[in-house]
Image (spheres, rainbow, N blue to C red):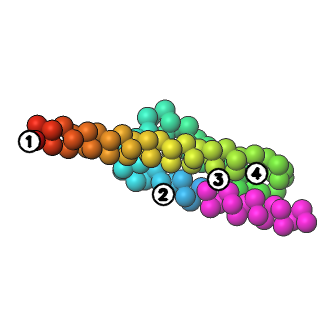
Amino acid sequence: MKFLRMAKAVNELDYYIYKMRNTLKKKDINIKLTSIEIEKIESSIAVATNLADESNHQVEIDVLEDHLKRLESSMEYIIAKTVQFFLIKILSIVLLFRKQYLIVK
């Protein structure tokens, strides 16, 4: 049972590492984050990578799972910030069209 739990934690950690690296490479996502936010996320990815690489040695399962939760939280933050950015853009476009419609009318 311990082996399966460890394998699941390592697989999920690898998945989030891959997902977050690819997300940070996207320009439309990257411009919405501050340099400090990017540094924190990159640092978190580096720690996760080291943990995943050392998982066959003496890394505790709880440590892997805790870091996985941190990565998930970081990913949720990126998603929320991106959604917020696009909602603000959409709202500003709607308001602009509404203003133009009122002027023309």
Magenta segment main secondary structure: helix
Q: Is residue 66 visible?
A: yes
Which residue is label 3 attached to?
49
- Residue 104 circle label: 1
Residue 26, image quadrant: bottom left
Q: What residue is rendered at 73% in x and 60% in y?
A: 10
- Please report the bounds of the magenta region as a residue range: 1-16
Q: CA distance from mark 1 to mark 4?
A: 60 Å
Q: Above or below — where is 94 with respect to 3?
A: above
Which numbered disc flags the more N-terminal residue, 3 or 2? 2
Residue 77, x across and y down, in percent: 55, 42
* Residue 10 falls left or right of residue 20: right
- Residue 92 circle label: none
Quarter of the figure that contains the N terminus = bottom right
- Looking at the picture, which amino acid does disc 3 mark? Thr
- Residue 64 circle label: 4
Quarter of the figure that contains the C terminus = top left
Q: CA distance from mark 3 to mark 4?
A: 10 Å
- In the image, which is nearer the foreground, mark 3 or mark 2? 2
* Residue 52 falls left or right of residue 35: right
* Residue 58 falls left or right of residue 29: right
Is residue 82 or residue 31 the one in the foreground?
82
- In the image, which is nearer the foreground, mark 1 or mark 3? 1
Which residue is label 2 attached to?
22
